[in-house]
Image (spheres, rainbow, N blue to C red):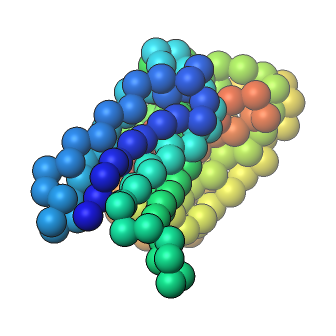
Amino acid sequence: MISSITAASSNQSIISDVNLSVSSVTSGTATLTYTPVTGANGVAIISVTVVDNGGTANGGVNTTIMTFEVQVVDCQKLTETNKAQFSLYPNPATDNVTVSLASDKGGIISVVDLQGRLVLEQTVAAGQQDVLVNLQSIAKGAYILKVNNGTYSSTAELIKE
């Protein structure tokens, strides 16, 4: 019989509030919820410890620990960063799309399909802000266009007609 179930975070500055709700001990079902600290970024390990009163005699196991790694990203910062990094037009596009960058640092423009496969990649030279991307080699459909300049990475949906 289970005598206790507990949960804890390894990094209180990332996840300080961990709650474990056991809905049925007989079926082994439990609900684990956690609340990341506002503005936090990083990794925390959540450990769930189950202790029973069966003892350890004859090779028995009294305690079982299950761990979960949780990566926390401050989505508010991502949204604010993503807004101002580039624009693209026309969208939907047919043969070409212009990517207008907010920075002149250069970088890489990538186009991936909705399965995550890279279908097109173009290097942007430092000082270049309006970049013409040739879409003639890719099929009609929906894609994700990503701009990465080493400082930021930003994405937008691209439709090829």
Horizontal side of 144 relative to 98 (left or right) equals left
In this view, 10 is above or below 57 = above
Q: Position of residue 42 (x, y in %)?
A: 63, 32
- Residue at 55% across, 49% down: 69
Question: Could you say which is closer to the camera, residue 134 or residue 46?
Answer: 46
Q: Position of residue 158 (x, y in %)?
A: 42, 47
In this view, 13 is above or below 132 = above
- Residue at 52% across, 16% down: 39
Q: Position of residue 92 (x, y in %)?
A: 35, 45
- Residue at 50% across, 84% down: 58
In this view, 83 is above or below 146 = above
Task: Find the residue positioned furthest to the front.
Answer: 57
Q: Position of residue 77 (x, y in %)?
A: 52, 19
- Residue at 59% across, 20% down: 13
Horizontal side of 105 relative to 68 (left or right) equals right
Number of numbered tags placed on the structure image: 0
When asked about the image quadrant of residue 118, the answer is bottom right
Question: Could you say which is closer to the camera, residue 97 or residue 38?
Answer: 38
Task: Find the residue positioned furthest to the bottom.
Answer: 58
Residue 136 visible, this orientation: no
In this view, 89 is above or below 74 = below
Question: Could you say which is closer to the camera, residue 5 or residue 129?
Answer: 5
Q: Quadrant of the N terminus?
A: bottom left
Residue 158 visible, this orientation: yes
Q: Quadrant of the C terminus?
A: bottom left
